């Protein structure tokens, strides 16, 4: 998450503060080490019911958001249930909460570590061996969490919180060191998986910029005109299989009128039969094939179908988008996993949003507002998952939606409407409690 937040703040704002970032990382790691050592004797400072109250608060917020939402209400309510259920159990059953939390955290880390290892071995992306090592470390932490020795689950929360702080603090220190070495005027996106190296960075001129809003177009795998076998999660985030056994991965494109349209396709259709699909998932260079770029959204939609979703951004850096497109289109190579339509859109979106929070009148106010926005944390987690396996149209769609919430403030009229709705609900509740009970 910290990498994504630094991207939104921009290199101009954070590069000269790399020492402060280094100090924060060191302090974060020191706090994590203290918390971890404190948990080993079982008398940890972080008690389980604190964790339960935190989940309860977040669950109540999600429940209210779901009740007031006009879009994605089901997702908010499901999130609220997922948060409220363990919170109530932890608070109501303090004698068993330690073991419950240990089973919950250990199971999640075990599944996540196994997924990291499997995806790294299957896809073979850049630094896949490092990803496998991280998965092994996560499985070791999961086994330690599930093992009752030495505190009989009393130190579960403190141990895991401490380990998380140490790892995140160390990563922050490494990022600060890389930030110190970043060339002047270079984009910070190169530090977090940008699609073009430092050697290709030449600042664009104002004449290169577009003039309209940036639009992310997404054709989901199970979009209109298809009849997939219903597997909701797989259909949305990986690929949909229709009744004839054909695999569809969907598509993503990015538009910035009048002169930028990023839609990357293979020049020759890839064999997506189930027998060959596992082989072409490899991100190795031998799976690179010639690619092509479509000229416009209208031509693409007329030749295929309208996109399933459209996400509009107004607060963008148009010069960086134009330069990214100039650098990216110099190489037409296409790889189904490491250089596909979705990865191109994700990297272009990073270029577009770099520094948008730092360009406000009160950048540090925007920083703290973004830091307390759950969508930023989810976007950071989703980004790491995509980098560990592959960007897909479903992941790009959610990534763009989450970033839109972070960088595009809700219009004042919508805020007023929601505030009025909240006041109406509270007034009705207060009126109901103030009425005398009839006997």
Image: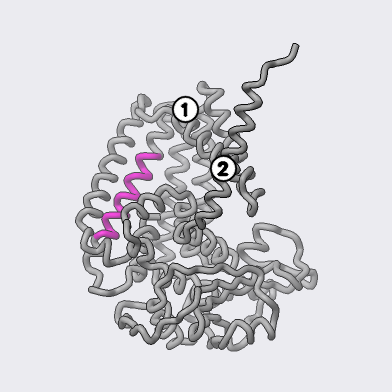
The quarter in which the C terminus is drawn is top right
Q: Is residue 172 magenta?
A: yes
Whether residue 120 appears in this view of the structure is no
Q: Tell me the quarter of the picture where residue 156 sits.
A: top left
Quadrant of the rendering where the N terminus is positioned: bottom left
Circle 2 is placed at which residue position? 62
Residue 258's spot in the image, x, y percent?
A: 50, 85
Q: Which of 409 and 179 is in front in this view?
A: 409
Residue bounds of the magenta highlight: 161-176
Q: Residue 49 carries which label?
A: 1
Give the class, few, some or many, for how many residues have Cα within 10 Å of label 1's Cα (few <14, many ≥20). some
Residue visible at 57% across and 28% down? 89
Where in the figure is residue 72, as x and y percent of width and height? 63, 53
Q: Which of marks 1 and 2 is nearer the N terminus?
A: 1
300 relative position to 163: left or right: right
Query: Does residue 365 lie above or below 258 as drawn?
Result: above
Extreme residue toward the right, this view: 243
Q: Which of marks 1 and 2 is in front?
A: 2
**For residue 320, which quarter of the picture?**
bottom left
264 within the magenta span = no
Residue drawn at 45 percent across, 37 percent down: 145
Q: In this view, does 335 lie above or below 435?
A: below
Q: Magenta-highlighted stretch: main secondary structure? A: helix
At label 2, counting other C-alpha atoms closer than 10 Å, the crowd grade (few under 14, some 14-19, many 20 or more) is many
SS at badge 2: helix
Between marks 1 and 2, how big is the CA–CA gap? 20 Å
- x%, y% of residue 199? 30, 81
């Amino acid at each position: 998450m910290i990498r994504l937040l630094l991207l939104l703040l921009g290199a101009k704002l954070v590069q000269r503060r790399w020492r402060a970032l280094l100090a924060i990382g060191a302090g974060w790691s020191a706090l994590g080490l203290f918390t971890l050592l404190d948990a080993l004797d079982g008398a940890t400072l972080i008690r389980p019911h604190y964790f339960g109250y935190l989940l309860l608060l977040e669950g109540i917020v999600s429940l209210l958001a779901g009740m007031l939402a006009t879009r994605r209400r089901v997702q908010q309510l499901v999130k609220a249930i997922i948060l409220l259920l363990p919170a109530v159990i932890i608070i109501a059953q303090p004698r068993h909460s330690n073991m419950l939390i240990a089973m919950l955290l250990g199971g999640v880390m075990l599944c996540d570590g196994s997924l990291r290892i499997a995806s790294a071995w299957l896809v073979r992306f850049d630094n896949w061996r490092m990803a496998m090592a991280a998965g092994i470390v996560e499985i070791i932490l999961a086994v330690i969490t599930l093992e009752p020795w030495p505190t009989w689950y009393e130190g579960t929360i403190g141990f895991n919180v401490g380990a998380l702080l140490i790892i995140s603090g160390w990563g922050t220190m490494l990022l600060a060191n890389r930030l110190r070495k970043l060339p002047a005027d270079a984009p910070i996106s190169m530090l977090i998986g940008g699609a073009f190296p430092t050697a290709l960075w030449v600042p664009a001129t104002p004449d290169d910029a577009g003039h309209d809003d940036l639009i992310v177009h997404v054709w989901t795998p199970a979009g209109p005109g298809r009849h997939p076998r219903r597997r909701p999660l797989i259909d949305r985030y990986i690929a949909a299989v229709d009744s004839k056994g054909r695999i569809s991965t969907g598509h993503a494109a990015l538009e910035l009128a009048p002169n930028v349209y990023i839609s990357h396709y293979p020049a020759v259709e890839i064999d997506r039969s189930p027998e060959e699909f596992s082989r072409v998932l490899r991100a190795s260079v031998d799976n690179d094939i010639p690619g092509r770029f479509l000229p416009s959204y209208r031509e693409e939609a007329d030749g295929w179908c309208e996109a399933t979703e459209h996400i509009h951004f107004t607060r963008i850096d148009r010069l960086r988008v134009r330069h990214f497109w100039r650098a990216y289109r110099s190489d037409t190579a296409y790889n189904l996993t490491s250089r596909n339509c979705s990865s191109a859109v994700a990297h272009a979106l990073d270029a577009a949003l770099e520094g948008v929070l730092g360009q406000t009148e009160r950048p540090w106010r925007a920083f703290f507002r973004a830091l307390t926005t759950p969508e930023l944390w989810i976007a950071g987690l989703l980004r790491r998952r995509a980098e560990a396996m592959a960007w897909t149209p479903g992941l790009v769609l959610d990534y763009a939606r989450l970033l839109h919430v972070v960088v595009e403030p809700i219009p004042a009229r919508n805020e007023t409407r929601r505030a009025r709705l909240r006041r109406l609900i509270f007034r009705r509740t207060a009126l109901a409690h103030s009425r005398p009970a009839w006997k």
